[in-house]
Structure formats: structure tokens, C-alpha cells
Image (cartoon, rainbow, N blue to C red):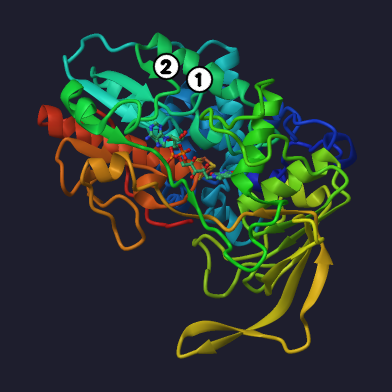
Amino acid sequence: MGKPTGFLEFTRELPKKRDPQQRIHDYKEIEVQFSEQDSQRQAARCMDCGTPFCHSGCPLGNIIPEFNDAVYEQNWAYAYEILASTNNFPEFTGRICPAPCEASCVLGINKPPVAIEFIEKSIAEVAFEHGYIIPKPPKERTGKRIAVVGSGPAGLAAATQLNKAGHTVTVFERADQIGGLLRYGIPDFKLEKWTIDRRLAVMEAEGIIFRTSVNVGVDLKANDLLEQFDLIMLTGGSTVPRDLPIPGRDLKGIYPAMEFLSQQNKRNANLPVEVDHRGEKYADGDLWAANKNVVVIGGGDTGSDCVGTSNRHGATSVTQIELMPMPPKDRAENTPWPNWPMMLRTSTSHEEGCDRHWSINTKEFVSDGNGNLKAMRIVDLTWKNENGRMQMVELPGSERDIPCELALLAAGFLHPQHNGLLDDLGLEYDERGNVKATNYQTTTNPNVFSAGDMRRGQSLVVWAISEGREAARAADCYLMGESTLEAKAVSMIEVA
Ligand SMILES: Cc1cc2nc3c(=O)[nH]c(=O)nc-3n(C[C@H](O)[C@H](O)[C@H](O)COP(=O)(O)OP(=O)(O)OC[C@H]3O[C@@H](n4cnc5c(N)ncnc54)[C@H](O)[C@@H]3O)c2cc1C
Ligand code: SF4
């Protein structure tokens, strides 16, 4: 333990954020640099409590007290070694993880928890800066060929681990660039895309082959894939958005959030915006929020990203509505420490300006008479507990129209796309429509594995990395009879 009295001497501090009025004019990261000394002071707050719940709060099982100690000792190379033993991409999780580890930090019982996420980011950035992250190709190749389909965090983690085990890995991606939702979903102001390119350069130098603009199932048929590779790892994400089929849905001005967000990612990368990242035409070639009243339907992360992007476009007003009731301001009683707390979360995008409303249902999209969206008809709800199930009831007389020329549907994703590759492979689906797999191996074809949102359902980057790593280990065991890849320490606390 670095500093026994650190938690008594230092308070929790996070990197400063740029002023909202300044940052809404660009897509650069919001937090300013955290110095090595700041990180050291924050790491000194770790109590080395003996039973580190943070370790099991992290879906990757990150060995947090040990890397905190190494940071306190300013032994950054060792801190990175510890962190990289469980997490392939701390530069991503250190920026965009909701940090369930912090919710289960023992210090957090009666003081603000250790700033684990930002310590993690610091370790990754110092490691890149000091040259501790260098390509490490495997010494020997096994001769086994593996296709990874989908290049989000699950696919990238699986590819890194399988390559490390000596297999020859090709990653197929139907979009024109690698990264999945890291690239075409999560806004640049949360994750600048050079961070992905920097990591891809390391992976390529380690021998991983990347093939973009290949829609597997269409450009490369399922049977050809099975013939050409010894094992298929499916990490195609959860891509079918939840729609809102109410009157007026066909009006111009209503779009899935992903269309809006990925188009802005393309703009930031100076790529043409008329077609989407897969080369297909957008419904609106220049989906733009300036001078519009924007309503974001859905209170989650995707919705919050639409809020931040709409403000950057210069929207007249931005409103976010949610069907469910407003969560409590503090940890709800039914999610006590060390669980992931059910509570109100205010993102940096919300801080930049947004009207948030809960317990609202959308009844109709209202036309201006020329086929364009003019308003949204909404109604207030109350929620009643009937035999343990929450039932929504409309409040009589609360129906009203709110001005809206741009409605963004951010109500989540249903499951992966079935038609095409998955159906062609003859896979089974679970009750939610995700790929059914036991220990990541699909139930109908032993040579086909699946991980990430495609198997788990819509989740988090940290879970995608965890799934990719675990699936790689299971696949390596299947191919070789045993695996030298690291096994995860058991994670006990479920989040998202
Ligand atoms: C807007 C938004 C914001 C988010 N913000 C956060 C956040 O701040 N923090 C966080 O932890 N999580 C966040 N998430 C969730 C997180 O991004 C996902 O859980 C994670 O990316 C899932 O990783 P994945 O690798 O399973 O799939 P994805 O990242 O979805 O990648 C799947 C890839 O597979 C490709 N693919 C699919 N089918 C084929 C095919 N047939 N052939 C070739 N390629 C194919 C797709 O094009 C895609 O690139 C966010 C999600 C969204 C939508
Ligand atoms: S990956 Fe997320 S949960 Fe795990 S230690 Fe980092 S911030 Fe915490």
C-alpha cells in the first residue's frame, strides 16, 4: 500500500472540464489533461482495504489496488503491465466507462470513492507517451485461421487475444472504418478517434489483418467463411434499433439516433456524409439540428449523446423525454453499496443545456401539412405497481403538443440483425433475440463463437472487451485443447 493515510489527506478530484459554452463549439474531448502528480495523489487515496470490491465491480476484474499502488510509487511501466493483464484497451474505458468499480469502492461507503477511471486513463496515456506500449507479435503461429466478424470493442479484444495465442486473425468489418460503435456511434467529444487509430497501429504491427467494407453474409457468404477459416468469432453488435410505430412516423424529421450520431462522426472525420458508414444512402443526406426544436426520445446514453451533438449543431431547443419515472437523486434503497446504483445521472451533454422530462409517452408525430414534422403530441404518465409489475397510466387532460422539427429515436436496440449471416449460419437465438451461445460457443455450430452486444444484448464497452477476451480464451481452448490466455477473476456485480 502506497500511502496509508492518503485517503485522510487528499480529497477526490477529477480532471477539470472545459467550459460548456466553449466546448459546444467543437468536438474535442471535454476533460483537460490530468497531470502525473494529480493521478499519483488520487491513487494515494486507495486504502488497500483487503477485500477490494472495486475489483469485482469491474466487469474485466481489473486489479485496481495493485495499479493504484504502482501509480503512487510512480512506477508507470508496472502500473500498465498490471492494467494490461486484464484490459486490452484502458485508453477507451479510462474515457467512457461508467465506472461501476467506483460505485463499489470501499472508501465510497462514507467518502467519495477513488477516481479509478481517471487513474486508468492516466496509466494508458503515460504508457503510450513513454513508449511502454509496443507491438508484441506472437513468437510462434499455430497455423489456425480465425475470422472475427465485427470490429467493435468485443471484436478487437477477441482479435488481440487470439492473435496473442498465435492464431492468424482476420477482422472483417462492413463499415468503411474499424471500431464499431467506438468509431460510428460514440461522439468524438467523449472519445476522439485518434485513440482508436493509435491502438489499431499496434494491433496491425502485431499481425492482425483488417478488412473493411466487407459485409459478411453479403460480400462474403457464410459457407465461404466456414470453408476459409478454422473458427468464426461473431462480434457484430446489437444493431436493430427499437422503432416508435405511432401515427405520423413517416413524416420527414424523425430519425434513429444512430443515423444522426454516425453522420456527425463522419463529418468530424472529413468523410462524405451522403452515405452511411457502410456506403448506403442516408434517409437525410445532411441530418442537421441547427435552428430546430429537437426532441430526443429516450433517456439513456445514446439520447444524451444526441443532446450533446444537437447543441453543437446550434439547435433552438433540446428536450429529452423518457417513459420511465425520474430516478432518485441518490443511490436507490434497492441498489445498496456495492451494487451499481439506480440513480439520476447527469452527463456532460446535459450540463451543456437540455430540458429533461420523465414519465412522458409520445402519442403522435404532428404534421405541418406538407409531410414535415411540426410537433410531438405527448402525455404525462403515472406508474402503478400492480402485482409486482409496473404499469403506466396516462394522466387525463395532460395531452399536449410540443414544437419539434427534429425527433431522434434513442430508445435502444432490440437485438442483432438476424437475416443474412446469422440465419445463413443456422444459429439459434435466445428469448431476447440475441445469439444463443454456451460459454461463447454457439449452440448449433461448434466452430462459430459469439461475444459482445451480439450475444449479450446492448451493453457497455467494458463488457464488450470482457466478452471478447473470455470468448477468445474459450475458442483457444476449443482449438488447442488448453489456453495460455489469462482467465478472468470472477466478477460478482452485474451492471447494465
Ligand atoms: C450512441 C452510443 C453511445 C454509447 N456510449 C457508451 C459509453 O459512453 N460507454 C460505454 O461503455 N458504452 C457505450 N455504448 C455502448 C457500447 O458502445 C457498446 O456496448 C459496444 O460498442 C458493443 O461492442 P461490440 O463490439 O459488441 O459491438 P459494436 O461496437 O456494435 O460493433 C459491431 C460491429 O460489427 C459490424 N458488423 C455487424 N454485422 C456485420 C457483418 N455481417 N459483416 C461485417 N461487419 C459487421 C458493425 O458494422 C459494427 O462495426 C454506447 C452505445 C451507443 C449506441
Ligand atoms: S474498466 Fe471501467 S469498471 Fe473497470 S476499472 Fe476501469 S473504469 Fe472501473
The quarter of the displayed image where residue 97 is located: top right
From the top left corner, tell me how far across and down residue 283 is, in percent. 63, 41
The amino acid marked with disc number 2 is Met
From the top left corner, tell me how far across and down residue 469 is, in percent. 33, 35
From the top left corner, tell me how far across and down residue 471 is, in percent. 28, 38
Image position of 233 with respect to 323: above or below? above
Q: Residue at x 43, y 30 (%)?
A: 151
Q: Residue at x 56, y 16 (%)?
A: 128
Disc sitting over residue 355 in the figure: none
Q: Residue at x 42, y 27 (%)?
A: 173
Image position of 134 with respect to 28: above or below? above
Mark 1 CB within 8 Å of ligand 1: no
Secondary-structure class at tag 2: helix
Image position of 272 with respect to 477: above or below? above
The quarter of the displayed image where residue 159 is located: top left
263 vs 302, nearest the viewer: 263
The amino acid marked with disc number 1 is Arg
42 vs 481, nearest the viewer: 481
From the top left corner, tell me how far across and down residue 13 is, in percent. 73, 42
| C-alpha span from label 2 to label 1 | 6 Å
Q: Check the image and name the residue furthest to the front.
A: 370
Please name the residue that numbered disc 1 is placed on: 199
Disc sitting over residue 203 in the figure: 2
Secondary-structure class at tag 1: helix
- Circle 2: is it few (<14), some (14-19), or many (20+) Cα within 10 Å? many
Residue 120 visible in the displayed image: no
Is label 2 in contact with label 1 (beta carbons under 8 Å)?
A: yes
Image position of 209 with respect to 171: above or below? above
Q: Tally the marks.
A: 2
- Circle 1: is it few (<14), some (14-19), or many (20+) Cα within 10 Å? some
Q: Residue at x 59, y 38 (%)?
A: 185
